Image: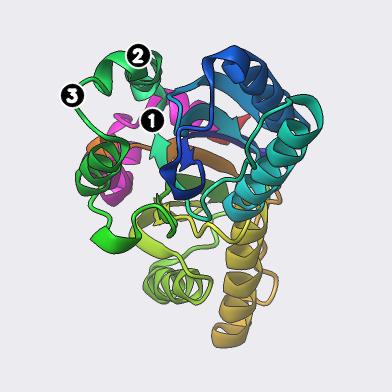
Amino acid sequence: MTNHSFTNLLFHLMWSTKNHEPLIEESFRIKLSRYLCGTVKGLGGVPIQIGGTRDHVHLLYVHSPKISLSKFVSEIKVQATHWMKKSIKTSFPFYWNSGYQCFSVSENKKEQVKEFIQNQSHFHRDQTHKDEIIALLQKHHVPFNHDWVFSSSYTMLLTHLVWSTKLRQSLIEPDIQKKLYSSIGEECCNKGGKVIEIGGIEDHVHILSQLPAKISLADFTQHLKTTSTRFIRREFPSSWNFEWQSGYGGFSTSVSMSEIVQKYIKNQEHHHKSQTFDQEIEKLFRM
């Protein structure tokens, strides 16, 4: 691999108006959508599809690895509120609810989510926004409180991480591997995340994890690398020169695809021996 990092973090983000009031009028909805897309770009993201109704917004976008989700949402809400008050002359105060919902999306599910957002007006002929949120939370296996659906934030950010040892050296020996994986899992929890699956071979590691909303992917990955390097050098003195490559790969994963990714990670040794591994993922890993 390389000292460069490659990421593709597709997120489906939703948030609603204060008290779920129908404040987003047709007369300025397109202007608001354009402003929101510009704000996404200003925060390092790439807007793909935006939509919603009079009381909420849906956004499918590529998230920057350099900013946490919570900071991203806070910025986009604050800037949009300021723009509304300054540019749109309304007869009512405009505010957003404090909470939001966000789910990771696999590349092969992007068009499906785009279509869902495009068809919001049709979808909400039969369902309320609360019904929609609850259905999505249940689909993504996210625990929630019915009384705090709008004011609380709920996320399921599954991320497939891959990174290698310095110069692809075969440094992860069998006696190191198990303890290394345990250490990474513990540090992931310390940062508010969770390791779903971890695996690899002697020169690289794959992790499927839940990314915490309050830390950027870049900082999260760097923390796991730094702490695991210290752990190996401390626990295995003969590996005093252990070092990770500075780059990494990070790819969002839909819940519906998580079992496939888990199986792929769990069977890394077999994949590499039989050359049946995912060519696209490994191609990035070797660039």
User: Viewed as shown, does residue 183 lie left or right of 82?
Assistant: left
Considering only vertical position in the picture, is 142 above or below 145? above
**Residue drawn 53% across the image and 71% down it:** 191
Residue drawn at x 48%, y 54% is: 99
Q: Amino acid at mark 1?
A: Ser
**Sooner in the amino-acid sequence: mark 2 or mark 1:** 1
Q: Nearer the viewer, residue 35 or 275?
A: 35
Depth check: give the residue in front, 120 or 166.
120
Q: Can residue 43 be spotted in the picture?
A: no
> Viewer-proximal residue, 30 or 251?
30
Q: CA distance from mark 1 to mark 3?
A: 27 Å
Residue 106 is tagged as 1
| Separation of residues labelled 3 and 2 (CA atoms) | 17 Å
Residue 265 lies in the magenta-colored region: yes
In the rendered image, which quarter is residue 95 located in? top right
Judged from the image, the secondary structure of the residue bearing numbered disc 2 is helix
Q: Are marks 3 and 2 in contact (CB under 8 Å)?
A: no
Displayed quadrant of residue 225? bottom right
| Magenta segment, prevailing SS (helix, strand or loop) | helix
Give the residue type at disc 3.
Answer: Asp
Q: Earlier in the sequence, mark 3 or mark 2?
A: 2
Highlighted magenta segment, given as a residue range:
258-284
Tell me the SS state at disc 3. Answer: loop
Viewer-nearest of labels 2 and 1?
2
Report which residue position mark 3 lands on: 126
The residue at which mark 2 appears reads as: 115
Measuring from the top left, give residue 238's x and y in whole percent: 61, 80
